[in-house]
Amino acid sequence: MTQSVEDETTINDSYSVTVPAAVRRAADIESGDKLRWQVDDDGALSVEIVKQRYGAFSELQPVDIDEETNAADDHDLIAGDP
């Protein structure tokens, strides 16, 4: 059985909120995750956690294509363009 966690926070002058520590722990929210807010027709607010974990590609191995690349110079190139 999952334990329910409830807490409250105050919206500051810049309309920011802090997610309480107990809620972060219970919902497994980490730095870099996003919260997607939705208000339905009745005015009920819901929040969905969108996981944005660092290291998502850390298990991938680099591929040697036998040519030097430079992402800073090549990032705007389109395949096939000179």
Image (tube, helix red, strand yellow):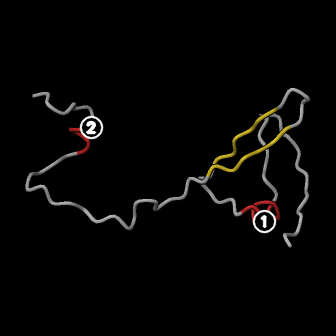
- Residue linked to disc 2: 75
- Label 2 neighbour load within 10 Å: few <14, some 14-19, many 20+: few
Q: Quadrant of residue 62?
A: bottom left
For the image, the number of numbered tags is 2
Q: Quadrant of residue 61?
A: bottom left
Report the front residue among 18 and 82: 82
Q: Which numbered disc flags the more N-terminal residue, 1 or 2?
A: 1
Residue extending furthest toward the front: 1
Identify the mark at residue 41; answer none if there is no mark: none
Quadrant the C terminus occupies: top left
Q: Quadrant of residue 17?
A: top right
Seen in the picture, residue 22 relative to 18 is either above or below; the reply is below
How far is the residue under mark 1 from the one under mark 2?
39 Å
Q: Residue at x 91, y 56 (%)?
A: 7
Q: Residue at x 75, y 61 (%)?
A: 27
User: In the image, is 55 to the left or to the right of 8?
Assistant: left
Measured as percent of width and height from the top left, residue 67 is found at 9, 52
- Residue linked to disc 1: 26
Q: Residue at x 74, y 38 (%)?
A: 37
User: In the image, is 36 to the left or to the right of 80?
Assistant: right
Measured as percent of width and height from the top left, residue 20 is found at 82, 57
Say what amino acid the circle numbered 2 marks.
Answer: His
Say what amino acid the circle numbered 1 marks.
Answer: Ala
Seen in the picture, residue 15 relative to 19 is either above or below; the reply is above
Q: Secondary structure at mark 2?
A: loop
Q: Secondary structure at mark 1?
A: helix
